[in-house]
Structures are given as C-alpha cells and as structure tokens.
Image (spheres, helix red, strand yellow):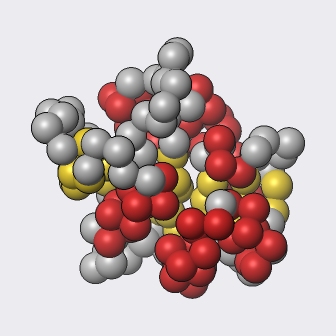
Amino acid sequence: MATKDFFTAAVLLPPSGAAQGAPTLDEVAAAAKAAGAGPLVAVVPRGFSAPAVGRTVHVAPRATRIGAIRAGMAQLANTPSRWSLVLPRVAASADEALLRALIDAAKSSPAAQLIAREGAALDETPILVARDAWLTLLTLGEQGMDAVAAKLGLVRA
C-alpha cells in the first residue's frame, strides 16, 4: 500500500477501441497495489459491473480518454495522494516492475511533474502525474499527452 510519506493513487481506465490482449481490470489493480498505489479508482463504462478494486466511477460507453481520466481524477480530490498513476488497459499497466520504477523515479526526482516509461508513446503507456500537475493534465489532456508533456516537462523511467 502507499506509504504515509509518499501517497500514490491509481486511475484504471477502461479499454480503448482495440483492446485485444489487454489485461483485465483485476490484473491492472493487482499490479498497481503491489507497486504501492492506493487508493485505486476504476473507470468503467455505464452498465459494466466492476470488480471490487476500490472506488468505481461510471462513464458513457464512448467516453473520451480524457473524459475517463477526468472522472477518475475527480474521485481523488479529497485524498492525500501526491501522485496518480494513470493506467490505460495495455499490457504495461499490469507490469508491477514498471509501475514500481515509475514510483521510484518520482521519489528520486521530486521536481518531476510527469513520468513515463522510456521510449513509449505517452497516450499508450502508464504515466505518473504529480498532484500539482493534475489541473494541467485535465485542461490540456484533450490535445493528447504529448501536449501535456510539452507544458510540464517529462521524466522517462
């Protein structure tokens, strides 16, 4: 679980268009918990019954990625989380070692605002967002994660 001095939450996104081979919500939640994230927020389409992984928020079945992120992040407003893992339903989101590496990078780079895996496209990989950057993510997110990274700067792990 998250340590008292380094709270990291996780927002688990619904699968996008072609989710062939995507990990299950349970697999992503298990990896996030094992990496030290908590609380967890599962964002799922309306009508979908989510497993008990933490908080659940329902969005329209065709909600945009940023719409899903906004809905999930809103659930974290009253938590002590200093960071949030944004976890799309891709194989890397179920990789506990990668999620741990992102969190470790944040611990060693306290000024970082946005952290992602080396070489990965930002819209298709887990990212770690500092609480101070949540507003930027939510306002620039419609332009894609590259626009967010251009504004905030990016640390690769």
- Taking depth in this image into account, of 130 and 45 the one nearest to the observer is 45
Task: Residue 35: give x, y in percent of width and height.
Answer: 52, 43
Give above or below for 110 relative to 157.
below
- Residue at (65% x, 61% y) in the render: 144
Horizontal relation, residue 55 to residue 74: left or right: left
- Taking depth in this image into account, of 61 and 146 the one nearest to the observer is 61
- Residue at (64% x, 66% y) in the render: 143
Task: Residue 47: give x, y in percent of width and height.
Answer: 14, 38
Horizontal relation, residue 140 to residue 75: left or right: right
Would residue 6 be seen by someone viewing this image from the given angle?
Answer: no
Task: Residue 14: give x, y in percent of width and height.
Answer: 38, 40
Task: Residue 48: give x, y in percent of width and height.
Answer: 18, 35
Would residue 58 be seen by someone viewing this image from the given angle?
Answer: yes
- Taking depth in this image into account, of 89 and 59 the one nearest to the observer is 59
Q: Residue furthest right?
A: 119
- Residue at (80% x, 66% y) in the render: 154
Give above or below for 59 relative to 142.
above
Give above or below for 45 relative to 73.
above
Q: How many marks?
A: 0
Q: Residue furthest front?
A: 62
